[in-house]
Image (cartoon, grey):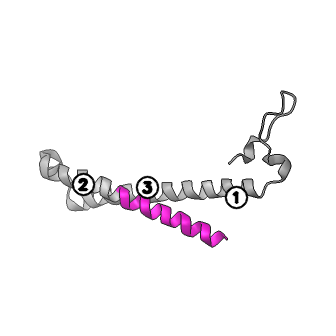
């Protein structure tokens, strides 16, 4: 079961990295051609670092969000029945919102 979660998180991270690469490469490469300061001060290595940093951040953020959402969903599914009831129970008893999906 854990292998399926990690594969799903990896896929979500890869999709986010692909989108972030395209979204950051286009303005980076366009600014190199159109803005004199960027053209003079950011070499191809710097351009590649900008794009790869954005892609790497997007990958880890998306994968982490997917892992947390899967953990939250599965912790709710495996919780005892008395903790799954998250309806209002009056002011005297706190409701267990921790396991809410």
Give how far apart the Cα atoms at labels 1 and 3 are. 24 Å
Q: Quadrant of residue 91?
A: top right
**Camera-side residue of 90 and 45:** 90
Q: Quadrant of residue 88?
A: top right
**Camera-side residue of 59 and 81:** 81
Left or right: 51 as drawn, with respect to 13: left
Q: Position of residue 6 (x, y in %)?
A: 58, 67
Which residues make up the magenta segment? 1-20
Q: Which residue is mark 2?
A: 26
Residue 35 appears in view: yes
Tag 3 secondary structure? helix
Residue sitting farthest toward the right: 92
Q: Which residue is mark 1?
A: 74
Answer whether residue 59 is magenta in the image.
no
Q: How many marks?
A: 3
Q: Are marks 3 and 2 in contact (CB under 8 Å)?
A: no
């Amino acid at each position: 079961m854990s292998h399926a979660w990690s594969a799903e998180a990896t896929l979500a991270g890869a999709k986010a990295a692909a989108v972030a690469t395209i979204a950051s490469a286009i303005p980076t490469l366009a600014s190199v051609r159109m803005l004199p300061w960027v053209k003079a001060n950011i070499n191809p290595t710097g351009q590649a670092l900008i794009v790869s940093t954005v892609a790497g951040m997007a990958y880890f953020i998306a994968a982490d969000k997917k892992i947390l959402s899967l953990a939250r969903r599965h912790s709710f599914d495996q919780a005892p029945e008395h903790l799954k009831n998250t309806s209002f129970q009056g002011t005297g008893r706190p409701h267990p919102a921790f396991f809410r999906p």
